Every structure is written in C-alpha cells, then in structure tokens.
Amino acid sequence: MIKKEAKNKVRRRKHARVRKNITGTAERPRLCIYRSNSQIYAQIIDDSQGVTLVSASSLEKPLRDELEYGGNIEAAKAVGKSVGEKAIAEGITEVVFDRAGYIYTGRVAALADGAREAGLKF
C-alpha cells in the first residue's frame, strides 16, 4: 500500500524551502498569507526587525459584516484589498509575495489580485 503524505506537511516543507531565499526588508516587506478551510489571513512582515507591520483577515469586524463566508474567493479578494489599503496608508508600496507553499490559484490568487488592485506592487 502506498502511503501518501499529509498535504499540510508537504506545504510546510515547501514553505521552509522558499523561506530560505525570501525575506522581507524595511524597504520591501514580505506579504505572507495563511488560508484555513473557513478563513484567510494576510500580514506584511519586516523580517529584519521581526515585526508585523500590517495585517488583515476575514475575521475582522468590517469584513465579517460584509462577507457571509470567510473561506471563499470573494473573501480572499476583500482581505487582499484590505491589507493593500492598510499598507498604502502605512507608506508601504512594494512587497515580496510569500504564498506560504500554497499553489497560486483560487483564493491565493484572489488575495494577490485584491492587494494589487489596492495599489501594492509585487
């Protein structure tokens, strides 16, 4: 019988491999995402200081009121716009996109598109 590794274990290994090369700086911080089955989260991180500069999620009060479900493409796009607007307000215009081992499709791509629409460059 062939044993199949858990998807999250494979994703975390991919993420560790990519994180060796991707770091966020003060000039160009890292936009990192996390998606669960029911929610999606995004944060902009300055790895040189080890601080989160901006964050957004589908659990935040304004987004939660307008969305009926936090785990779909519509919610991901709204979170992307929210994190992008907050970043622009903080003076962040360019970021490095860290998809955290997830495949760039569906909710991950929608979040990235929302952030680009808000004015972030990556």
Image (cartoon, rainbow, N blue to C red):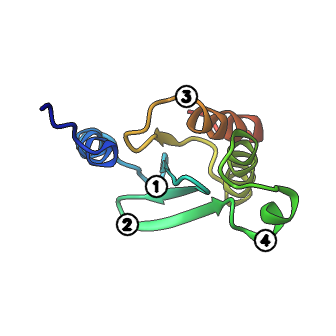
Residue at 40% x, 44% y is: 100
- Mark 1 or mark 4: which is in front? 4
Q: Are marks 2 and 3 in contact (CB under 8 Å)?
A: no
- Badge 4 amino acid: Lys
How far is the residue under mark 1 from the one under mark 2?
Answer: 8 Å
* Residue occupying the far top of the picture: 105
- Mark 1 or mark 3: which is in front? 3
Q: Give coordinates of residue 34: x percent, y percent.
A: 49, 53
Residue at 72% x, 68% y is: 60
Residue at the spot of label 3:
105
How far is the residue under mark 4 from the one under mark 2?
Answer: 29 Å
- Indicate which disc, 3 or 4, sits on the residue closer to the N terminus: 4
How far is the residue under mark 2 from the one under mark 3?
Answer: 31 Å
The local secondary structure at tag 2 comes to loop
| In the depicted structure, whether residue 49 falls above or below residue 76 | below
| In the depicted structure, whether residue 17 falls above or below residue 31 | above
- Mark 4 or mark 2: which is in front? 4
Q: Give coordinates of residue 14: x percent, y percent.
A: 27, 39
- Indicate which disc, 1 or 3, sits on the residue closer to the N terminus: 1
Left or right: 12 with respect to 62? left
- Indicate which disc, 4 or 2, sits on the residue closer to the N terminus: 2
Within 10 Å of disc 3 (Cα), the crowding (few <14, some 14-19, many 20+) is few
- Indicate which disc, 1 or 2, sits on the residue closer to the N terminus: 1
The local secondary structure at tag 4 comes to helix
The local secondary structure at tag 1 comes to loop
Q: Give coordinates of residue 4: x percent, y percent.
A: 21, 37
Residue at the spot of label 2:
49
Within 10 Å of disc 4 (Cα), the crowding (few <14, some 14-19, many 20+) is few
Residue at the spot of label 1:
26
- Indicate which disc, 1 or 4, sits on the residue closer to the N terminus: 1
